[in-house]
Amino acid sequence: MSEPCVSVLVPTHNRPQWLAEALDSVLRGEFADLEVVVSNNGRPEDTRELAQAVRDPRIRWIEQDQTTAFQNFLAALTQARGKYVAILHDDDRWQPRFLAALVPALERRSDAVLAFTDHYRMDADGGIDVAATESNSRRWGRTGLARGYYQPFLEIAARQTVAITACVFRRASLSASALTPEVGSFYDIWITYQLACTGGAAFYQDERLALRRVHDSSASASHDLAGYVSAIRCRQRMIADPRMEPHVGVLRERLARDHLSAGAVLLRRGSRFGARNHLLTAARLAPSWKAVAGVAATWLAPTSMLPRL
């Protein structure tokens, strides 16, 4: 088979119904010159059954062992053959115009390494949450962001303006050596940072052409300590990068939030000393009542109350 223009990577884990919706949104899209790499590290029977129902020669099905989400993503990335790469998590969807709107922006300029769009937030049933969508766009700096190319786009990387499932990037511009194990679940933000460090341009399409699902088992809702630790390590590396010096303020605020979250998880687990270290660091980086209250709780809260904090 000839090499496709775009490799769509779909890491999946035990979500066959949502995976079917994600694949349908890609295969029915307006852009056809693509391959889809489905990398499954969950129940193999789920993808076997789906492969029987979705018979499209553009899909390649890969089975993994019980790897981490990061390892599952890397396995898919190593199989990518396209000039460009797009990542679609198994619980998200794209609008029909998603690739058709973003790929031409990369084709127009050889120095463009990333193209991205805004997205809707939807609930577990697929309903769009309008208020949460607007709040999310404001929080991550997409509200008011003009359509066009940004070069450099280090500020965009620092503010986490790019959602990994709402972008397309040039495969040759991302060094595989940058995706080390310590990156872990922070890989979505780390990829944008690595692409920004190339000095290339990012294109923003000021439309909502993707839909991200928020649910109890999503990464953002799981309160995974390993994820916060990965974020802390990577964010510290970003702060130490001289190129990011103009954006250290934003990075320190994000880092404080990571420490606050890690401290909260450890406190609920009863690890007072570990929690205290993270919460004190959060208070030093960006003083807040939550950090101060958390530090106090590590000394004063009864053990029986910790799981409920």
Image (cartoon, helix red, strand yellow):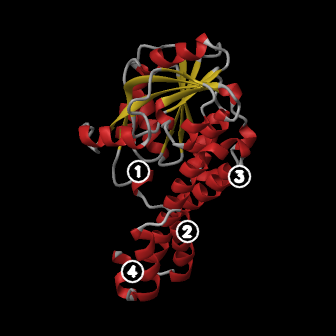
Image location of residue 108, percent across then percent down: 59, 10
**Tag in front: 2 or 1:** 2
* Label 1 – label 3 distance at C-alpha: 30 Å
Q: Which residue is mark 3?
A: 240
Q: What is the distance, in whole Å, between disc 2 and disc 3 at their CAs?
A: 17 Å
Front residue of 232 and 169: 232
Real-space CA distance between mark 3 and mark 4, rounded to the nearest whole angstrom: 35 Å
Q: In this rendering, would 77 be left or right of 303?
A: right
Mark 2: amino acid: Arg
Residues 268 and 35: in front is 268
Give coordinates of residue 301: x percent, y percent: 39, 86
- The kind of residue tagged 1 is Ser
Q: Quadrant of the N terminus?
A: top right
Res 229 visible? yes
Residue at 42%, 81% in the rendered image: 297
Front-most of residues 279 and 129? 279
Assess disc 3: are there few (<14), some (14-19) or many (≥20) residues with their C-alpha within 10 Å of its C-alpha.
few
Quadrant location of the C terminus?
Answer: bottom left
Element on which disc 1 rests? loop
- Residue 151 image position (x, y, % from top left): 62, 26
The answer for how far apart the CA atoms under marks 2 and 1 are is: 30 Å
Query: Secondary structure beneath disc 4?
Result: helix
Please, what is the three-letter code of the amino acid marked with disc 3? Ala
Task: Residue under label 1, please give it.
Answer: 218
Say which quarter of the image contains residue 281: bottom right
The quadrant holding residue 46 is: top left
The residue where tag 2 is placed is 284
Label 2 or label 4, whichever comes before in sequence order: 2
Q: Earlier in the sequence, mark 1 or mark 4?
A: 1
- In this rendering, the label closer to the viewer, 2 or 3: 2
**Which badge, 2 or 3, is on the more N-terminal residue?**
3
